[in-house]
Amino acid sequence: MKDCVVIVTGGSSGIGRACAIRFGAAGARVVISARQADRLKMVETEMLGKGMEVHTVVGDVSNEDDCVRLINETLNRFGRIDVLINNAGISMRAMFHGIDLKVIRQLMEVNFFGTVYCTRYAMRDLLKSKGTVVGISSIAGFQGLPGRTGYSASKFAMQGFLDALRVENLNTGLHVMTVCPGYTESNIRQAALTADGTAQGESPREEEKMMTSEEVAEHIFQGVVKRKREVVLTTQGKLAFYLRKFFPSLVDRLVYRSLEKEPNSPLK
């Protein structure tokens, strides 16, 4: 990864921040993008303090123009793109029958179209470098999660898009990898949207018992280096991934029971 140019969306916290630091530590030139300029600046300062080469671009991946600007600034600064990590994303926690449809639309705009926009405008240069497109998906990208209909829909869409992109580029040298981290210590649950579109503000799970963002970033780094097709993490995630192929009804029940036990679960 030394001297490779790596773009990380949602790079101001969680898995995105951890990826930026991990690739930066390997000598990559890293471009990080996020909506919150203050948090982005903190990551930039941290990386510069460690002698890493980093450039920041404030922007929202649900805005197509911001995605164009992210790619253009990367090319103006470094002249190439080797790895695009589509990490920016939001979640939700509400029953579908009571949800404001703007929440579903927002999830699709960020999680799905954000990936589509960034990938589309980086595609020409990724093909030149025979580079890598990474999509940070979820267990929700292959198993529908109750109380997370919009989130599952957006991640299923992302998975389908990237799977098709992989097949489309079997003979071009482009590497496409999807990552399903399972439950990871991050702020995505605090920022998850409720039925009316407001953030729930606190996590319903014990964050300290989850896989850390740094562990996930290491798996992503190794996956890019080894050009893996997909990476499924955590014991719970791997069980869901493999069992649903043979016992889909059982997995549905297990998933329901697990989410039903969450504090203030919408399933209760």
Image: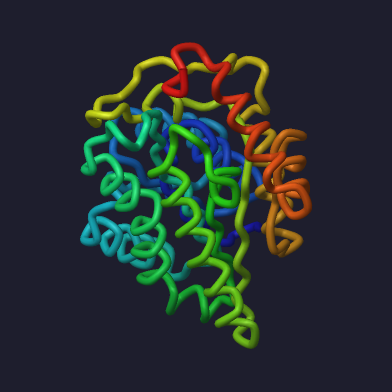
Q: Is residue 217 left or right of residue 67?
A: right
Q: Is residue 96 left or right of residue 18?
A: left
Q: In the current view of this chain or complex, which residue is farthest to the front?
A: 249
Q: Position of residue 206 (x, y in %)?
A: 59, 14
Coloured how? rainbow
* Between 192 and 28, the one nearer to me in the picture: 192
Q: In this view, does 118 lie above or below 199?
A: below
Q: In this view, does 89 lie above or below 254?
A: below
Residue occupying image coordinates x 43% and y 63%: 78
Q: In this view, does 174 lie above or below 219?
A: below
- Dividing the image into 4 quarters, which one contains the N terminus? bottom right
Residue occupying image coordinates x 62% and y 33%: 255
Count of number-bearing discs: 0
* Between 138 and 99, the one nearer to me in the picture: 99
Residue 104 sits in quarter: top left
* Between 181 and 148, the one nearer to me in the picture: 148
Residue occupying image coordinates x 23% and y 43%: 101
Q: Can residue 128 be seen in this view?
A: yes
Residue 79 sits in quarter: bottom left
Q: Can residue 5 be seen in this view?
A: no
Q: Where is residue 190 in the image (x, y as percent from the top left)?
A: 41, 22
Q: Position of residue 75 (x, y in %)?
A: 38, 67
Q: Position of residue 56 (x, y in %)?
A: 36, 45
Residue occupying image coordinates x 56% and y 58%: 134
